[in-house]
Image (spheres, helix red, strand yellow):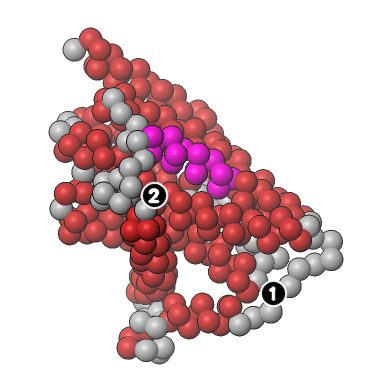
Amino acid sequence: MILVFLKLFVLMVMVMISTAFFTLTEHKVLGYCQLRKGPNKVGYYGIMQPFSDAMKLLLKDMSCFMVSNEVIFFIGPQLSLVVSLMVWMVFTSSYGVSSVYYSMIFLFGCFSLSVYSILGSGWSSNSKYSILGSLRGAAQSISYEVVLVLLVVSFIFFSGCFSMEYFTGFSLSMNILFYLPVFSTWMVVSMAETNRTPFDFSESESELVSGFNTEYGSGSFVLIFLAEYMSILFISSFTSFFFFGFMSSFFLFLSVSGFLAFFFVWVRSTLPRLRYDMLMMLVWKIYLPLVISLIMIYISLKFFI
């Protein structure tokens, strides 16, 4: 039991360190996309920039307005970080750390909990702009979460199991005609689920603020920032495992996960933000009927062919 907790602790530490260097990668990629170098002064070629940013933020004073609900105001960022760390437990059964047989259901629950941190953080600030940003972000997450769950359900129909460790061989044996439409839909839905460009509607240009985290600073902002980038790394790793089944080859798994994480940054540097009404019409009028149709086709292939 102690060894299991020790392995989980090492996993969480490695995830947080990876997140720190992923932020540096994003700064570098965005810099070169804009024909500039990006961070290059702190340490060797700016490699210590994430730790400098973290130290600067943590040393700032933590303030809370008198009109804010202090308990929920401070619990919201902590909940988002805990949820972003908990989702990594679905990989532990594949590495023999622990066994989570119903890991897919556990993952759905974690995705659902992330909405409460967005709503709680925005509402507890008692700021109009924070509330508007949290409502937009929560509505977006809930809408695309439906499509995300249905996509995973289509895999569960074929594999016949809710555990991650049974998906490796299944992913490698899939036909390209099966996962190509699902993969393209999955990538778009993943960007919306993580509130990334072009679906970052917790922010708004007309409001000139950063959304539900407008009133946050110091350590609380660090927690929100870490949670967002941990979610990107998890989605990238989960996609690599889910669609390519590279868990047996750790190098290929890391390579594909790194490329998918780079893809999130690349999209941010190239695409503008969509309109909010276009976002909602995209999920409810296009992606949801498409995914339901795919599930019906896959069920018929499973039972009648």
**Whole-percent x and y of residue 79?**
58, 54
**Whole-percent x and y of residue 103?**
38, 39
Query: Is disc 1 placed on a helix, strand or loop?
Result: loop
Q: Is residue 27 above or below residue 284?
A: below
The C terminus is located in which quarter?
Answer: top left
In the image, is residue 105 part of the stretch drawn in magenta?
Answer: yes
Tally the marks.
2
Residue, disc 2: 89
Query: Label 1 crowding class (10 Å Cα cut-off): few <14, some 14-19, many 20+?
Result: few
Question: What residue is drawn where x is 22% and y is 54%?
Answer: 253
* Kind of residue at disc 2: Met
Q: Is residue 185 left or right of residue 75?
A: left
- Marker disc for residue 108: none
* Kind of residue at disc 1: Met
In primary-sequence order, the first of circles 1 and 2 is: 1
In front: mark 1 or mark 2? 2
Magenta span main SS: helix
Q: In the displayed image of the protein, which residue is found farthest to the front?
A: 1
- For the question of whether residue 2 can be seen, the reply is yes
- Marker disc for residue 62: 1
Q: Is residue 182 above or below residue 299?
A: below
- Magenta extent: 102-115
Question: What residue is drawn where x is 63% and y is 74%?
Answer: 218
